[in-house]
């Protein structure tokens, strides 16, 4: 399933829509090259969830908890770019917060899959010629056996 995202604003809009389908316990793994738009997508997810910002690309902080401003689940935003490996992932204690949070991990491929049997993988593919990006969604596990139609993936 793939969809085109032409601007950063569209990427944030998709994040808002995705947030509407997310609930506590969910794990979302974002992949895509540097500058692809992973953090931009997380900004939309944060807006949709109604959590306290700002969502930034952390320089030193690898994992940040954004509490809800509306009684919903907190957003745990992880940028695993600088993580050395599985041992360091373990030190983040993501498993302790997973059940009650929405956990979104940039550069998490190959590192955080062991946290839970279910995950939504969002791959951002960058078009070298312009601002155009395309998204490919892959659901793993029973939770994501069906990708919600509200996400509009494939409809555009
Ligand atoms: N279609 C698009 N989708 C997402 N970001 C875009 C798009 N077009 C341009 N941009 C810009 O590209 C940059 C993406 O940066 P960022 O979200 O930090 O990427 P990453 O976290 O993947 O390294 C932002 O400056 C954003 O405004
Ligand atoms: Mg980023």
Image (cartoon, helix red, strand yellow):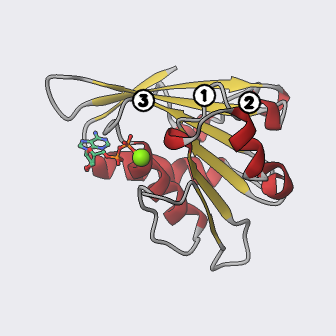
Q: Residue at x 31, y 30 (%)?
A: 133
Cβ of mark 1 under 8 Å from ligand 1: the answer is: no
Tags 1 and 3 in contact by the CB under 8 Å rule? no
Real-space CA distance between mark 1 and mark 3, rounded to the nearest whole angstrom: 10 Å
Q: Residue at x 46, y 56 (%)?
A: 44
Q: Which residue is mark 1?
A: 109
Secondary structure type for disc 2: helix
Specify the quarter for ligand 1.
top left
Q: Which residue is mark 2?
A: 113
Q: Is residue 90 above or below residue 23?
A: above
> Which of 126/71 is in front?
126
Q: Residue at x 59, y 43 (%)?
A: 105
Q: Quadrant of residue 63?
A: bottom right
Tags 3 and 2 in contact by the CB under 8 Å rule? no
Classify 10 Å Cα crowding around label 3: few (below 14), some (14-19), many (20 and above).
Answer: some
Cβ of mark 3 under 8 Å from ligand 1: the answer is: yes
Whole-percent x, y for residue 15 in the image: 48, 50
Secondary structure type for disc 1: loop
Q: Earlier in the sequence, mark 3 or mark 2?
A: 3
Q: Earlier in the sequence, mark 1 or mark 3?
A: 3
């Amino acid at each position: 399933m793939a969809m085109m995202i032409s601007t950063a604003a569209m990427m944030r809009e998709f994040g808002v829509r995705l947030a509407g389908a997310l609930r506590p316990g969910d794990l979302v793994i974002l992949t895509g090259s540097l500058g692809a738009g992973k953090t931009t997508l997380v900004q939309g997810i944060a807006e949709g969830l109604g959590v306290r910002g700002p969502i930034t690309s952390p320089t030193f902080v690898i994992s940040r908890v954004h509490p809800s401003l509306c009684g919903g689940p907190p957003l745990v935003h992880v940028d695993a770019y600088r993580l050395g490996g599985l041992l360091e992932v373990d030190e983040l204690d993501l498993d302790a917060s997973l059940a009650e949070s929405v956990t979104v991990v940039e550069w998490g491929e190959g590192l955080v899959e062991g946290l839970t049997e279910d995950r939504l993988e969002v791959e951002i593919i960058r078009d070298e010629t312009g601002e155009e990006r395309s998204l490919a969604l892959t659901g793993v596990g029973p939770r994501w056996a069906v990708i919600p139609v509200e996400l509009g993936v494939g409809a555009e």
